[in-house]
Amino acid sequence: MSGHFWAATSVPHDRFRLVRDEGLAWFRSSAEARRGFCRRCGASLFWQPEGEDRISFAPAALDSDAGLETAEHIFTEAAGDYHRPEGQPPPPGAGPERLRASCLCGALRFTLPGPAGEITACHCRQCRTLSGHFAASFDAEEASLAWGDRQGLAEYRTVGGGVRGFCAGCGSSLWFRATDGAFSVEAGCVDGPTGGRLARHIHVADKGGYYALDDGLPQAAED
């Protein structure tokens, strides 16, 4: 849903107040929980388990880090092949010649040439707010995407003039088109192996203070 992997903290319902909800949408991702996102921009915001008096939310949605720090990684066996939660990412695999990608609910599906190759992590405020943590994507030719279904596609034009594509039904982040036409696909929306490898971090001057970059990859303060 986030396009990479998600980070969350939680708060009891009696300490949580939703002050504006006109853009809030919910997607039931399982029998145990539903996910909340902004239907206007696709930002990943909430995870609400059934029968619990707490709500989880993305720390990247906060205006400050509020003294948070990363405590643990879960479901690491399901991590994408292009990174590890901690330490150096694995060497790139051969990868399929054609990548298959989709949103969480399956309403949007497309294929594109593989393997993914170098994948860049972006920590700018915009990417962190929209993904709920930070983004990871790889360059692609937009014309090379072959859509199986795109009726649920929504687009959000950012302040800088770029356009982000996401699913209107579940909020999954899919792609970004820059003002100069450069196009990138979110690595996390690829179904199965990407054949790619996380190669660098950019805009680390804007990174969240609640997590560390300990993979030894090159870092750039800006782009």
Image (cartoon, grey):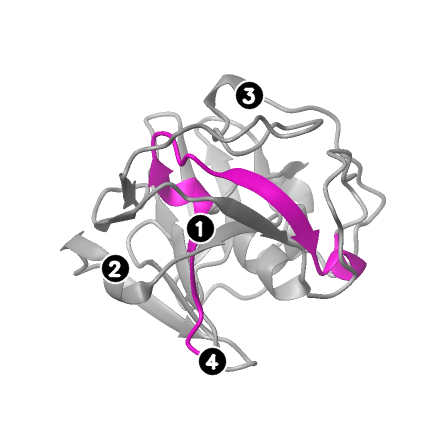
Residue highlighted by disc 2: 144
Q: Is residue 180 visible?
A: yes
113 sits to left or right of 26: left
Residue 80 horizontal/vertical position (percent):
48, 31
Q: Is residue 77 magenta?
A: no
Kind of residue sitting beneath label 1 = Glu
Disc 2 crowd, CA 10 A, few/some/many (<14, 14-19, 20+): few
Residues at circles 2 and 3 in contact by the CB criterion of under 8 Å? no
CA separation, marks 4 and 2? Answer: 17 Å
Kind of residue sitting beneath label 3 = Thr
Residue highlighted by disc 1: 186
Residue highlighted by disc 4: 180
Nearer to us: label 1 or label 3 = 1
Q: Is residue 23 visible?
A: no
* SS for dot 2: helix
Q: First in sequence: mark 1 or mark 3?
A: 3
Q: How many marks?
A: 4
Kind of residue sitting beneath label 2 = Ser
Q: First in sequence: mark 3 or mark 4?
A: 3
* SS for dot 1: strand
Q: Which residues are magenta?
A: 180-207
Disc 3 crowd, CA 10 A, few/some/many (<14, 14-19, 20+): few
Between 42 and 223, the one lying in front of the other is 223
Q: Is the N terminus in the top left, top right, bottom left or bottom right quadrant?
A: top left
Between 150 and 25, the one lying in front of the other is 150
Residue depicted at 46% across the width and 23% down the height: 78
Residue depicted at 40% across the width and 36% down the height: 194
Residue depicted at 58% across the width and 51% down the height: 120
> Against 193, is 59 above or below?
below
Residues at circles 4 and 2 in contact by the CB criterion of under 8 Å? no
Q: Which mark is residue 76?
A: 3
